[in-house]
Image (cartoon, rainbow, N blue to C red):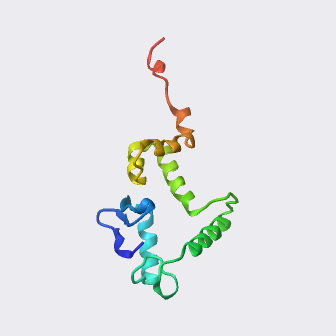
């Protein structure tokens, strides 16, 4: 991701040639704004937000190593890949009540069936659903 891909005024990150070689826009989390600003001031990246040696983007191998190190540091012992982050993003959105059609758009799924795969993972909402019968005074 390039520094210019973050639009702080609109709170949008543009991801170019993402999964499926499609461009898409995602929300820029307010919680990251201060952290990234501090990072930017300290490291002054030129083109890519996170630059490897010589200002080049990190390789897939380097990114995997960074993920594994971060997981180890956090005490996460599960198997995970970079793609797991995409699945986690979708699952958390669903569990937080985001409409599945919005998630479909964010993930750029052509078919809603692909997005519906996440519904079997997110079961926390099921226990919170109130039966229509509970609205009756019986």
In the depicted structure, whether residue 20 falls above or below residue 110 = below
Q: Depth check: give the residue in front, 42 or 19.
A: 19
Q: Depth check: give the residue in front, 37 or 13.
A: 13
Residue appearing at x 52%, y 86% in the figure: 53
Locate residue 45, reporting x and y percent: 43, 82
- Quadrant assignment, res 78: bottom right
- Quadrant assignment, res 31: bottom left
Give the mark count.
0
Locate residue 84, reporting x and y percent: 57, 57
- Quadrant assignment, res 97: top left
Residue extending furthest toward the bottom: 54
Quick one: quadrant of the N terminus?
bottom left
Locate residue 103, reporting x and y percent: 42, 48
Residue appearing at x 29%, y 62% in the figure: 10
Q: Depth check: give the residue in front, 133 or 120.
A: 120
Locate residue 118, reporting x and y percent: 52, 45
In the displayed structure image, the side of residue 80 where residue 113 appears, left or right: left
Residue appearing at x 50%, y 54% in the figure: 89
């Amino acid at each position: 991701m390039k520094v210019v891909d973050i639009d702080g005024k609109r709170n949008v990150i543009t991801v170019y040639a993402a999964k499926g070689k499609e461009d898409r826009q995602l929300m820029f989390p307010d919680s990251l704004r201060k952290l990234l600003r501090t990072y930017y001031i300290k490291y002054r990246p030129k083109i890519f937000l996170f630059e490897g040696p010589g200002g080049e983007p990190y390789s897939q191998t380097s990114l995997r190593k960074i993920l594994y190190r971060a997981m180890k540091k956090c005490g996460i012992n599960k198997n995970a890949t970079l793609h797991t982050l995409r699945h986690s993003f979708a699952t958390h959105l669903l569990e937080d009540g985001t409409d599945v059609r919005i998630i479909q758009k964010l993930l750029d799924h052509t078919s809603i069936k692909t997005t519906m795969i996440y519904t079997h993972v997110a079961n926390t909402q099921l226990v919170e659903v109130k039966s229509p019968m509970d609205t009756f005074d019986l």
